[in-house]
Amino acid sequence: MRFVTFNLRCDYQQDGINCFCYRQPMILRVIEREKPDILCFQEVLPHMARWLKESLSDYYLIGCGRGEALDGEQGTIAFRKDRYQLLAMSTFWLSEMPTVPGSRYPDQSVCPRTCTDAVLMDENSGFVFRVMNTHLDHEGVKAREYGIRQILRQADTEPFFSNAPLILAGDFNAEPDSPEMKPLLEHTGLTILTRNIGVTYHGYGHAEHPTQIDYIVLQGPFYCIGIRKWTDEENGVYLSDHYPVCAEIRWDLL
């Protein structure tokens, strides 16, 4: 499985030569070149979601906006039509009321945060696994910790396909050694593939403080045979202000 986490950068036409409209051709070329099986996108505004659905014809795309009216940014999961069967999916809010759209923790930014949860079956092997895609808060340290704990608790207690192996991905807005990452380190059986991947947020090559905040985490009979960043750049135009991270993942059938 070729698995990618990819923060697309919200498009408000604010980025000069790196506005989304200028990055789109490169994004499509790289996806066609790499042919990932699954992509977890973050910072997907409604018009960006429409473009992805129109452009990635080989994929099904799922996700909804994080706002009270299911508008605004979403975390989108894209998976290949010819390989995977969707068995279950949901979106829940990172809050004390996870089924209430737009809800959030008291000590976080004004932005609601969500997790898109999908259970997929590999049609060739019958292997069933869970993919969770999230984008944690950019201001609240405690909100990020609460969000990580909530996601792990949801994965552990979800009644449908409760024992499904897990791939958790997204922009966690925290460096690997940040205190809010402690739940990942303490949780039994998790492997953080991206722990030593280096800088992932680069601000189109101009970030004052480049950071490592994009993650792929495994739980279950997976093993990684390679991980790398997509660092494509053409005349100052990048894929995004984050490097997409791509992992080659295999699994042992039990």
Image (cartoon, rainbow, N blue to C red):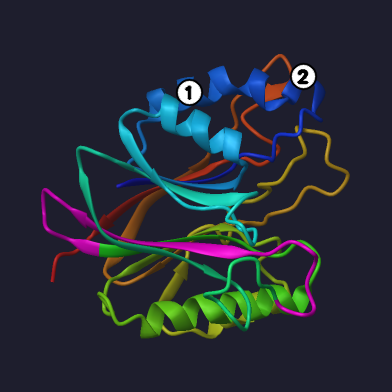
Residue 8: image x %, image y %? 61, 39
Tell me which amino acid carries mark 2.
Ile
Residue 68: image x %, image y %? 64, 62
Above or below for 166 versus 199 = below
Q: Residue at x 59, y 40 (%)?
A: 46
Residue wearing tag 1: 28
Give neighbour class at mark 1: few <14, some 14-19, many 20+ (Cα, 10 Å): some
Q: Earlier in the sequence, mark 2 or mark 1?
A: 2
State the extent of the magenta-drawn residues as a range. Answer: 105-128
Image disc number at residue 17: 2
Quarter of the image holding residue 223?
bottom left
Above or below for 251 versus 81 = below
The residue most toward the top is 235
Residue 211: image x %, image y %? 74, 52
Q: Residue at x 31, y 72 (%)?
A: 220
Give neighbour class at mark 2: few <14, some 14-19, many 20+ (Cα, 10 Å): some
Query: Which residue occupies the foreground of this view, 245 or 94?
Result: 94
